[in-house]
Amino acid sequence: MRQLTLACDTFRALAHNLTDFTADYLERLPQLPSYPPKISGQQTEHLFAGEIPLEGLGAAAFDSLNEVFEHSRPASPRFFGYVFGSGEPIGALGDFAASVLHQNATAWRSAPAAITIERTVVRWLANAVGCDGFTGSLTLGGSSANLMGLCMAREAKAPANLTGVRGGVIYCSTEAHMSIPKAAALLGLGHDAVRFVAVDEAFRMLTEDLRRAILLDLRNGKVPVAVVATAGTTATGSIDPLIAIADICNEFGLWLHVDGAYGALASLAIPDAFQGLARADSLSLDPHKWLYQPTGCGCLLYSDAAAAHRAFAHSGEYARALSDDPIEGFAFFEESMELSRPFRALKLWLSLRYYGLRAFQESIKEDLRLARVLADSIDAEPKLERLAPVALSAVCFRFVGCSGDIDALNQSILSQVVRRGRVYISNAMIGSSFALRACVVNHRTTEEDVQFVVSEVLAAADDLSGQKQPGEG
């Protein structure tokens, strides 16, 4: 037997032990600190930055898992940072099964079940968000989906695959995700090719400003390529006016990409807020956010598969499909920038089959309600000030209960909240103001959990009150 061959009984014993370990962890999860107490970079380096062992440790290799879990930020019910889903356990089991099965989900001939399941899940997602007839693929996340969508846009409006990039302009709001200028750079257009359009008081793109920017570029001989509308901005959850932006794209012949990585799946709960979504040429969304899947499950949907072929089809002879059958000859690598692809769809397929779509709809509705509960609690507290409307589930606010440098004070409060370990929030810039930010994208969260946000911010401010405050002499 070769050294890397694991006996089935050994695998079964290791898997049983791991199942017990992780089940115990999930049972303790609601009581765990929201951030590892007194953690430091020096500590994690000491624990995990050792040299590669020349001789195997055997089952003892798993002994350090306890320290890995202890020194990780838990997906607790009181985690409200960033826009990060809560890691639904059925999806975790799907990841485990997919790793054991070990498929390259790149073409039907290499992974017949995986390809069929992924195409099915993509169809389910498209139908669920009101984009019937769209196709697409699962991706690593929203950033890669946005990159692929804009690659399709560039090839449709300013082809570059054959002769190289010869200019092109992308338009998005000042609230757009950082992946948009990054995508412009990776596509060879450059950061200077991105026009950041102003937003209104609700942080939505001003469409008249968009029109003026397009007209100015046309007068200056530029080539407008695409508009990126955001369906759920990262900071505030704002939804750009999709119908008006789609009308402008139609008027000027531009590609419409909707970055719905955060918000698009909320259309399962509040579809009226996303009217115009189906007019997109491409749409990103993240099941690892609002379908609570383990990290690494994004999605790109598009209305025309031929546009994906134009952007991505460039196959070596060794990978060429040997069948003209629409099922057996299908290859994701002809519609994606990836060749080697994990079986991402299995976790989502299992989750949707286990719970049913309605359970996810209800959970998203509850997240939206809890964000409103938090906003109301903030509005009722004189020492707190809400800084933005709550369009989805992101709530931005600050402490204003004393004088001095308010931005510096709130930065200190944020650090103290995290140190206290009872709730985890993050930050945003709202205009020129530093904001505390809580985002509810968590299937474990209860109303009691969101109430901790207010009490912990006030307690952190009290902790700091005996110290010299930022801006005080």
Image (cartoon, rainbow, N blue to C red):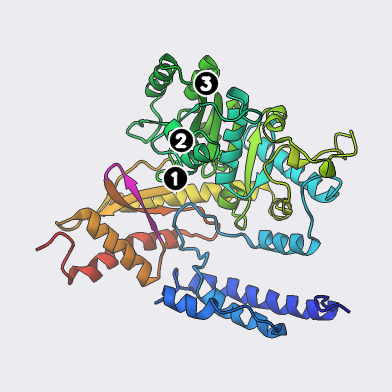
Q: Position of residue 328 (x, y in %)?
A: 88, 40
Which mark sits nearer the N-terminus, 3 or 2? 2
Where 318 sits versus 228, above or below? below
State which mark lies toward you, 3 or 2: 3
Q: Residue at x 84, y 50 (%)?
A: 110
**Marks 1 and 2 close (CB-CB < 8 Å):** no
Q: Is residue 220 left or right of residue 380?
A: right
- Of the pair 268 and 237, the residue shown nearer to us: 237
Q: Position of residue 84 (x, y in %)?
A: 51, 54
- Of the pair 11 and 384, the residue shown nearer to us: 11
Q: Circle 1 is placed at which residue position? A: 234
Residue 236 forms part of the magenta stretch = no
Q: Position of residue 439 (x, y in %)?
A: 44, 52
Query: Residue lying farthest left?
Result: 473
Number of other residues with Cα within 10 Å of mark 2, as a class: few under 14, some 14 to 19, many 20 or more: many
Give the Cα separation between the discs numbered 1 and 2.
10 Å
**Secondary element type, mark 2:** loop
Label the magenta part by its dominant secondary structure.
strand
Give the Cα separation between the discs numbered 3 and 2.
17 Å
Q: Is residue 427 left or right of residue 21?
A: left
| Magenta extent | 425-432
Q: Amino acid at mark 3?
A: Cys
**Marks 3 and 1 close (CB-CB < 8 Å):** no
Q: Which mark is residue 249?
A: 3
Using the rendered view, name the quadrant where residue 306 is placed.
top right
Which mark sits nearer the N-terminus, 3 or 1? 1
Which mark sits nearer the N-terminus, 1 or 2? 1
